[in-house]
Image: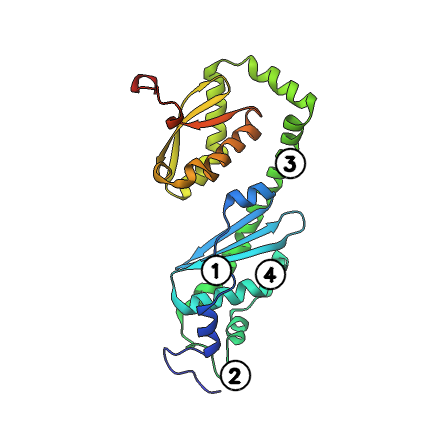
Amino acid sequence: MNEAPQNSFSEKLNDMAKTPRYRGAIFQIEADEKGQALVDCKESSLKIYLMVDPENDQILETRFFTYGGPVFTALADAFCAAIQNKKIEDLATVRVSDLELSLRDTPDVPALPADASELKSMELLITKIIESYPEKKIAALLLRENMEKIKYRTQSAEGRAEADAEWNVLSDSEKITRIENALHEYVRKVLHSDGGDLEVLGIQGNRVRIRFQGACAGCSAASGSTLFYIEDQLRNNVYYNLTVEPEEVFPGIGAEDR
């Protein structure tokens, strides 16, 4: 078999690296909103994202991100294309050698040097994805079950009446405790992944006052999608009629009120 010149790549690999179809990311917020499992694993400078239906283990969407240059880009794009709409169990049959073969210009000339470290990293990454999925699946199924309960509590008259009665007998400190517990469970891990956080300043009626911290404090999404996500999680997991407002909404609050 002919050998590819050292440090040279096939034209197909180079072309795919220039115009990958699956470059991007899938965020936990997106998966949670759809009731799907998100599997996101990293090896070296390559990260793969899979959105999976936990009911039937079907891969619904694939994305990747890397700073690792053309080899990682092309391998990841070939991998994402190969597993699109497959089942998680099918990942066990994916061979890195087949991915490399799909990147060749001609069958007898390798697409990249045989000792390229990216090949081993890709193998390790596939193994990580397979091993991490069961835990992600359980979490997604529990979320779906919780979403059904939330639907009853927020959309039916009986459910809202029950929620009102339960919420109205709580003291402010008890309400804040429930809010903090929900933030710890559903929100902070998402904010921490991007270097952000928040502090609960207090509650006025059904309005929760917060202060964004870290990366969230200077992020434009803090007044848009991030704020809506926080509010949605508190409405779903604490009380359906809560609103969340960052401290800028309360211009009269001084340090003594914080």
Query: Label 4, label 2: how many angstroms apart (C-alpha)?
Result: 25 Å
1 or 3: mark nearer the eye: 1
Q: Residue at x 39, y 83 (%)?
A: 5
Quadrant of the frame with the C terminus: top left
Residue topped by disc 2: 106
Q: Residues within 10 Å of mark 1 (few under 14, many from 20)?
A: some
* Amino acid bearing label 2: Thr
Percent of width and height locating residue 101: 53, 76
2 or 1: mark nearer the eye: 1
Q: Residues within 10 Å of mark 3 (few under 14, many from 20)?
A: few
| Picture disc at residue 179 | none
Give the secondary structure at mark 4: loop
Lower position in the chain sequence, tag 4 or tag 1: 1
Residue topped by disc 4: 84
Query: Label 2, label 1: how many angstroms apart (C-alpha)?
Result: 25 Å
Query: Label 1, label 3: how many angstroms apart (C-alpha)?
Result: 32 Å
4 or 1: mark nearer the eye: 1
Lower position in the chain sequence, tag 3 or tag 2: 2
Quick one: 173 or 30, which is closer to the camera?
30
Query: Label 3, label 2: how many angstroms apart (C-alpha)?
Result: 50 Å
Asked if the residue under mark 2 is in contact with the one under mark 3, i.e. CB atoms within 8 Å, the reply is no
Give the secondary structure at mark 1: loop
Lower position in the chain sequence, tag 3 or tag 4: 4
How many numbered marks does the figure carry? 4
Above or below residue 87? Residue 2 is below
Residue topped by disc 1: 23
* Amino acid bearing label 3: Glu
User: Among all residues in the image, which is located at the extreme left?
Assistant: 255
* Amino acid bearing label 1: Arg
Lower position in the chain sequence, tag 2 or tag 1: 1
Residue topped by disc 3: 145
